[in-house]
Each structure stands twice: as C-alpha cells, then as structure tokens.
Amino acid sequence: MKEQYEARMLRIHFGEVDKWHGKPLYEAIVNQCRELEIAGATVYRGIEGFGASTTIHHSSIWAFSKDAPIMVSIIDTEDAIQKLIPFLDEMVAEGLVAMSCVQVIRYSKSPSGSAPATH
C-alpha cells in the first residue's frame, strides 16, 4: 500500500553530552514524541560536526571524550509538530532546530496503518 501526503520535518541538532533531567537529551525528546503521539522520531549519531558555538563535536573510541553530534529527525503533521515545540523550548539549552515542509510517501504492507490527518 502506498500513501502520499504533506507533512513537516523537524531536525534537532545538539551534542551527545546534552542532558534533560539526568538522561540523554535525545532519549527525553523521543519519549516526549511518544507521549504526544507523534508519528515517528529517529536519532542519528554523527561522526563529527559543529554548530553556533564552533566547538567541534566528534565521536571517539575513548569513553571519557564522547561528544558526538546528535540529530533527532521527526516527521508528522504541522499541528503535531507545533505541540512539540514548547517542550523543545524547555529541553534544548543549546542546539539548532530546522523545520521544513516535506512530501511523504509511505509504504506499508497492510491497510491497517493510516496517514496522519492532513489539512
């Protein structure tokens, strides 16, 4: 089965050492997405990168020097994404959020899954 619809993609960039209430920030964001019933979220761990602070974040074989760049990618409707933004305002102390309109093509094996409501 193939479905097509317009959606929003949110990409949140920050460092691996960033925390929210003692747990990794990426875990906290994914958990919040589940609570808000966001369609999906994926966490990517990068090799190297930098942001506004110009501090280079990189992965390392040394456990004490891990600070790889992290990106959380989230795709859902505009309304669902807007419900997440106030939580990100609290959770992300330093980072970058990029939002864009996307065309989604969703493939599924059965018609039991449904696309998010569109406007």
Image: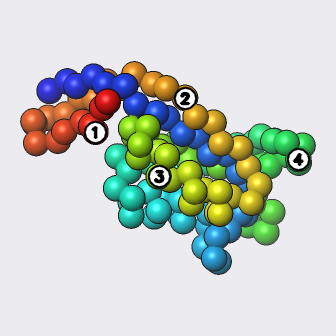
> At x 28% / y 39%, what residue is drawn?
116
Q: Nearer the viewer, mark 2 or mark 3?
A: 3
Q: CA distance from mark 2 to mark 1?
A: 17 Å
Q: Is residue 53 above or below residue 16?
A: above
**Could you say whether the residue bearing mark 1 is in a helix, strand or loop?**
loop
Sequence-earlier tag: 2 or 1: 2
* Residue topped by disc 1: 116
Report if the CB atoms under discs 4 and 3 are less than 8 Å apart.
no
Q: Which residue is mark 3?
A: 83
Which comes sooner in the sequence, label 2 or label 3?
3
Label 1 and label 4: CA atoms lie apart by 36 Å
In x, y percent, where is residue 10? 54, 39
Q: Residue at x 71, y 44 (%)?
A: 96
CB atoms of marks 4 and 2 within 8 Å: no
- Residue that numbered label 2 is attached to: 100
* Distance (Cα) linking label 4 and label 2: 23 Å
- In front: 99, or 28? 99
